Amino acid sequence: MKRKVIVFVACTLVCVFYAARAQESGTTDAERYIKESEHQWAEAVASGDVTVVERILAEDFVGVDTDGSFYRKAKAVTDTRETPKEFISNHANEVKVRFYGDTAVAQGSESWVRRTEKPLRGRFVWTDTWVRRNGKWQIVAAEDLIAPELAK
């Protein structure tokens, strides 16, 4: 009887170990994908690449713009197409991601240079909420703020 209990406990520990490793691997892949996608979305502001926005924003996406207004995916696509007229460059800085099951919260900032308007340089600071649906990670909510550049 003792031997059966020891074998059962050992098997259970092995299963838990492998399940944890599999989940960790999935989280690592998801984190990499989310960070890469956030960098691509930042670059799209200056390049006008709407394919990134179309891929990563969910159909029911709602964002809060820097002026406090709400916008949907369709407006994000249209704005991305138009922003190269306004921005010379936009690059994501550090992106941090935290997971809560099938939900992830990504937070970071972007440094940008505008063609016109004052200030010509600045940063966006943002929080994006990602959800995994049908095995696909997409942003369902975003909030953006304009922040001054960090002192170097």
Image (tube, rainbow, N blue to C red):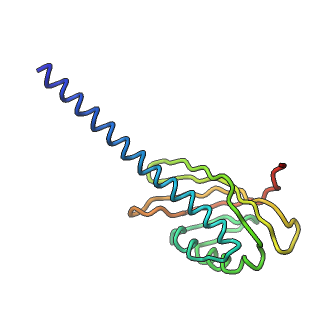
Residue 82 lies, in percent from the top left, at: 70, 80
- Give the total number of marks visible in the rendering: 0
Is 15 situated above or below 75?
above
Which residue appears farthest toward the right when viewing the image? 118
Is 121 situated above or below 13?
below
Quick check: 51 left or right of 3? right
Which residue appears farthest toward the top when viewing the image? 2
What residue lies at 86% left-to-right and 74% top-to-bottom?
116
Quick check: 50 left or right of 147? left
Q: Quadrant of residue 46?
A: bottom right
Is 1 situated above or below 125?
above
Quick check: 54 left or right of 82? left
What residue lies at 24% left-to-right and 29% top-to-bottom?
10
Of 132 and 25, the residue lying toward us: 25
What residue lies at 47% left-to-right and 61% top-to-bottom?
137
Residue 30 lies, in percent from the top left, at: 47, 55
Residue 150 lies, in percent from the top left, at: 81, 51
Of 40 and 73, the residue lying toward us: 40
For the N terminus, give its image quadrant.
top left
Q: Quadrant of residue 118?
A: bottom right
Quick check: 146 left or right of 75? right
Residue 64 lies, in percent from the top left, at: 67, 64
Is 5 situated above or below 71?
above
What residue lies at 57% left-to-right and 72% top-to-bottom?
52
Q: Quadrant of residue 14?
A: top left
